[in-house]
Every structure is written in structure tokens, then in C-alpha cells.
């Protein structure tokens, strides 16, 4: 019964995750009946910027707190291991939904591309960003990423490291995809730019902490991978690897 209930709970969390991801795509594309990045309650721009940054900060704080080992230990005492990841996914989905629902647009336009084929090309790159972000989760362990595997098996997913697919090109393809989805658009308003910049800052901080955790968990295999594989830009050799090639031993 524990396994059945845990699996049902994880499925609900996963469905919430899917709904919010679809909403996020429509939100940034400025389509659909719900609030979008450029369509919502009219607010003076200083107030809108303050509300929007507060929303992003609450979302980021949740991720930062949950990522701490001390927090994970506390939740491990309060929650069954089967549903720990699913609970994280459900909470993150709820907080992202709050950001999308309560977002205050700042509609002043920075750029607006109408000419073809450039407008279509920009939408294509934006769509590619979403596909890269979603595809990256399947190149590691999608079911483990969303908590379904843990709910069914009762065990954490294996942490064996394999640099395959997009991970052979960059260390953080999911983040690369999100950055493309956030920034590449034919219509960039100040509200959209604020959303993209705020979440880009969070991504930069998140990568730093994730790198530290991966190095601690996986050790030298990940360190070797990091020395030869760029973090976000394919073909850009990491600084540590360039130093090694010039005779300087990387840290």
C-alpha cells in the first residue's frame, strides 16, 4: 500500500510539473488565456519590478533551501524517502505557478522583430531551447528527475556518471536550453527581460552549487569531465582545461 500511495502521489506531482511547464511555455510566448509575461494586471513599473523580483526570489529560495544537505536530512526524517523528490517537484511546480500567475508585466518594448524569416527563426530557436531543456532530463534519468522512480522502487536513482548525448557537448544542457527559451524572442519587453535576467542569475548561482555537489559526489571522474567539457557554450573550452593545455595544472 505504501508503494501504491507513494506512486500515486508522485504521479500527481508529475502531472502538476507537466501542467506548469506547458503554462511556462505559453507564458513566455505570450499566448493563451492565462497571465503571460506581457499580459496581466496593469501596475506602475517600479511596483511591478518589485513584485516580480520578490516572486522569483521566493522560487529561488525554495530551490536553495532544498538543495542544502541539512535541509535534506530534516526532510528525510519527516518524509518517506519514496516521496522526497516528488515533494520537491510538487513544491517547485506550485511556486513556479505562483510566479506565472502573479507576474506583473512591464510592457515597454526593447526590441520587436517583424521581418521574416528572422521572426520565425527566433521562435524556432526559442522552441529549440525548450526541447533541449526537456530532452536533457531524458539523457540522465527523467523518471528519477521527477521522483517517479524513487516512489516506485523506494531507492534513490543510481549516481553513475555518463557523459552522453547533449552532456557530451556541455555540462548543463538543461540550463542552456532554458537560457535560450528565456532570451530568444522576436518581442522583448522590459518585463520579459526582467524575467529572463532574474532566472538567468538564479541559474548561474544554481550551476555553481550543483558543480560543487557533483564534484563532491562523483569525485575525479566528474573533475576530468569538467576539465574537457564547457559548462554552457558548446565548443568553448573550459578555463581549467585551457590552463592544463598550456602547462598549468588545473585546481
Image (cartoon, rainbow, N blue to C red):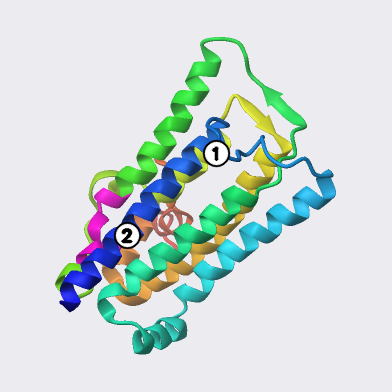
Under circle 2, the secondary element is: helix
Q: Residue at x 63, y 18 (%)?
A: 113
Indicate left or right for 94 with 114 as reference: left
The dot on residue 27 is: 1
- Position in image of residue 20 (x %, y %): 45, 49
Which part of the image, by quadrant, shows the C terminus?
bottom left
Q: Is residue 202 above or below residue 236?
A: below
Q: Is residue 52 above or below residue 126?
A: below
Can the viewer see residue 187 in this picture? yes
**Nearer the observer, 229 or 198:** 198
Q: Residue at x 43, y 37 (%)?
A: 129
Marker count (numbered): 2
The dot on residue 12 is: 2
User: What is the quadrant of residue 145 in the picture?
Assistant: bottom left
Q: Residue at x 21, y 58 (%)?
A: 162
What main secondary structure does the magenta stretch of the protein show? helix
**Nearer the observer, 15 or 28:** 15
- Position in image of residue 199 (x %, y %): 58, 52
**Nearer the observer, 237 or 230:** 230
Is 201 a magenta residue?
Answer: no
Point out the tag, 2 or 1, that comes first from the N-terminus: 2
Q: Is residue 206 above or below residue 192?
A: below
- Position in image of residue 12 (x %, y %): 32, 59
Indicate left or right for 185 with 238 as reference: right
Which residues fall within the magenta stretch? 137-149
How packed mark 2 is, by other alpha carbons closer than 10 Å (few <14, some 14-19, many 20 or more), is: some
Amino acid at each position: 500500500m505504501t508503494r501504491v500511495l507513494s506512486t500515486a502521489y508522485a504521479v500527481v506531482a508529475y502531472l502538476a510539473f507537466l501542467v506548469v511547464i506547458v503554462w511556462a511555455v505559453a507564458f513566455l510566448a505570450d499566448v493563451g488565456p492565462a497571465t503571460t509575461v506581457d499580459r496581466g494586471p496593469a501596475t506602475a513599473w517600479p511596483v511591478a519590478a518589485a513584485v516580480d523580483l520578490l516572486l522569483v526570489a521566493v522560487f529561488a529560495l525554495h530551490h536553495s533551501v532544498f538543495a542544502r544537505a541539512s535541509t535534506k536530512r530534516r526532510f528525510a526524517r519527516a518524509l518517506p524517502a519514496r516521496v522526497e523528490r516528488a515533494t520537491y517537484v510538487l513544491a517547485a511546480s506550485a511556486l513556479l505557478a505562483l510566479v506565472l500567475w502573479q507576474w506583473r508585466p512591464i510592457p515597454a518594448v526593447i526590441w520587436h522583430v517583424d521581418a521574416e524569416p528572422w521572426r520565425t527563426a527566433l521562435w524556432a530557436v526559442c522552441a529549440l531551447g525548450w526541447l533541449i531543456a526537456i530532452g536533457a532530463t531524458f539523457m540522465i534519468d527523467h523518471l528519477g528527475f521527477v521522483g517517479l522512480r524513487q516512489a516506485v522502487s523506494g531507492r534513490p536513482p543510481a549516481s553513475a556518471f555518463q557523459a552522453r548525448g547533449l552532456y557530451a557537448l556541455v555540462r548543463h544542457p538543461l540550463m542552456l536550453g532554458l537560457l535560450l527559451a528565456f532570451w530568444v524572442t522576436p518581442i522583448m519587453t522590459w518585463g520579459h527581460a526582467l524575467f529572463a535576467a532574474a532566472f538567468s542569475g538564479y541559474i548561474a548561482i544554481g550551476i555553481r552549487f550543483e558543480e560543487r555537489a557533483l564534484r563532491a559526489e562523483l569525485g575525479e571522474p566528474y573533475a576530468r569531465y569538467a576539465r574537457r567539457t564547457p559548462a554552457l557554450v558548446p565548443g568553448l573550452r573550459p578555463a581549467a582545461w585551457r590552463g592544463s593545455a598550456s602547462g598549468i595544472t588545473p585546481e
